[in-house]
Amino acid sequence: MVNLAIIGGGPAGYTAAELAAKAGLSVLLFEKEALGGTCLNLGCIPTKTLLYSAKQFHNALHADKYGVTAENVSFNYAKIVQRKTKIVRKLVAGIKAKLQDCTVIQGEATILSRTTDKVVIACANELYEAERLLICTGSDNFVPPIPGIADNPAVWSSTDALAATELPDSITIIGGGVIGMEFATLYMELGVHVTVVEALPNILPNIDHDIIDQLRSKYEKAGVTFITSARVQAIEGNTVRFRRTDATDDESLQADKILVSVGRRAHLPCLDNLPELRLERGTIVVNEHMQTNLSNIYAAGDVTGKIMLAHVASRQAQVAVNHILGNTDEMHYDAIPSVIYTNPEIACVGLSETDALLNANAVIRKLPMTFSGRFMAENEGENGLCKLIFDNQTQTILGVHMLGNPCSEFVAVAAMAIETKQTVSQLEKLIFPHPTVSEILKEIV
Ligand code: NAD
């Protein structure tokens, strides 16, 4: 019997396996597809790789802004996709290497039985026993019940879009959330005609309104069409039929491809033999130690339905392993940075302006990113934005919201300030390297 069995080898599963093995536990990790999960194989890494190529092309096309002449700029999309595949392969190999002290079993694991001191799991015709189980089975693309989606060759999921080796001339993206906007960025920069249809009044519903206004107007100038407050009614071939909230008639839109990106849903393993496991709205309920209501069963990552981000999953995995090892640790969700890889990119952490305004003591400060010399040097024609929210009474930092490259690279400073309850004057005294875009965090206080 091993100390810990883990189902799922994504950021939660592989992080937990590595940490537990390093601490001396015997670990079994079950993975039915490739190690690395959605993030590495079908999400974060492949999209960022494609987006980087698109950014290179876009920068070369607009090099004259920086006094550089680049003629006959072109790209080879098949090569861009090949590079993405190579990078994913290398990173998967890197994870395999990190898991040398664990036993990795390739196949779909089924939970057969559970008592307070033992869990029995079947995989590829073998039986395995573990003292504890950590479920990290992730999430799947949600397919909405829109007539005409199933078996329609014009319809893409994000997985289909990543696998395609040719670009469409035009694309309709259903859902202006994170996935929709990152693909809109990729296609826009590579010259595809993009239309985004979003059910809510604006794209990226949870992002700061000033950031969205600036980003949306930039994308519109670049030729992207946004149809908001519009719900898709049906898809017929490559035509999307939608209805605006205040309208009584449908309108339609035609494009070569239709990308459906309307969210993800937790992927539960078969739980027939664990009827007592507590679930809520299709996710596994966990406490602050990532422990379920069954004392030797833990869950981490998208399957817990908390915040579907790889860095949340890996931190949850760390908390679960620490609890199993008897170390003090608990999961908090107040200072989780989130980044959206549009161009310019968006990075946020902490309380939003809307939530802060419910608190009478909140102070909101805004500054264009152009207050940073490095930003000016490298972002010709861009304004960007940094918004700081702090408590007027305690002076503690509550939220930071930014638009401008490369804010993803220093949002962790703001996350640390929020997590450790730093005040504005403490942030002011911190020494930032000059010239960097990160200095905006000092300028704004
Ligand atoms: P999402 O929830 O971010 O966005 C889905 C959007 O689709 C919403 O704006 C919703 O209003 C809209 N929508 C739903 N039904 C619709 C309909 N019928 N017609 C038109 N619009 C409709 O979901 P996502 O973009 O699919 O992303 C899934 C998850 O993956 C999220 O949790 C996200 O945080 C995560 N993710 C994160 C990153 C990142 O961190 N950079 C990148 C990609 C995905």
Image (cartoon, rainbow, N blue to C red):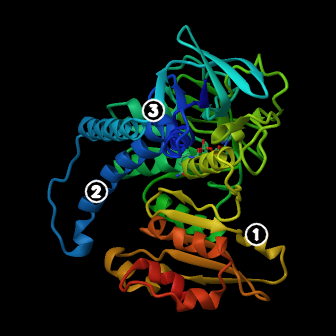
Going by the numbered disc 1, the residue's amino acid type is Thr
Going by the numbered disc 2, the residue's amino acid type is Gln
Residue 254 appears anywhere in the view: no
Q: Which numbered disc, 2 or 1, marks the residue that appears first in the sequence?
A: 2
x and y, in percent, of residue 1 in the image: 61, 23
Say which of 254 and 442 sits in front: 442
Distance CA(mark 3)–CA(mark 1): 39 Å
Say which of 160 and 215 sits in front: 160
Residue 363 appears anywhere in the view: yes
Residues packed near mark 3 inside 10 Å, few (<14), some (14 to 19) or many (20 plus): many
Say which of 207 and 35 sits in front: 35
Distance CA(mark 3)–CA(mark 2): 29 Å
Going by the numbered disc 3, the residue's amino acid type is Leu
Question: Which residue is disc 2 drawn over?
Answer: 56
x and y, in percent, of residue 123 in the image: 56, 15
x and y, in percent, of residue 75 in the image: 23, 45
Question: Which residue is disc 3 drawn over?
Answer: 35
Say which of 103 and 201 sits in front: 103
Question: Which residue is disc 1 drawn over?
Answer: 354
Relative to residue 169, is residue 64 depicted above or below? below
Q: Which numbered disc, 3 or 1, marks the residue that appears first in the sequence?
A: 3
Name which residue lies at 64% across and 18% down. Answer: 121
Name which residue lies at 77% across and 42% down. Answer: 286
Where residue 173 sits, quadrant-wise, is: top right
Q: Secondary structure at mark 2?
A: helix
x and y, in percent, of residue 128 in the image: 60, 18
Name which residue lies at 52% across and 50% down. Answer: 181
Residue 66 in the figure: left or right of residue 344: left
Q: Which numbered disc, 3 or 2, marks the residue that appears first in the sequence?
A: 3
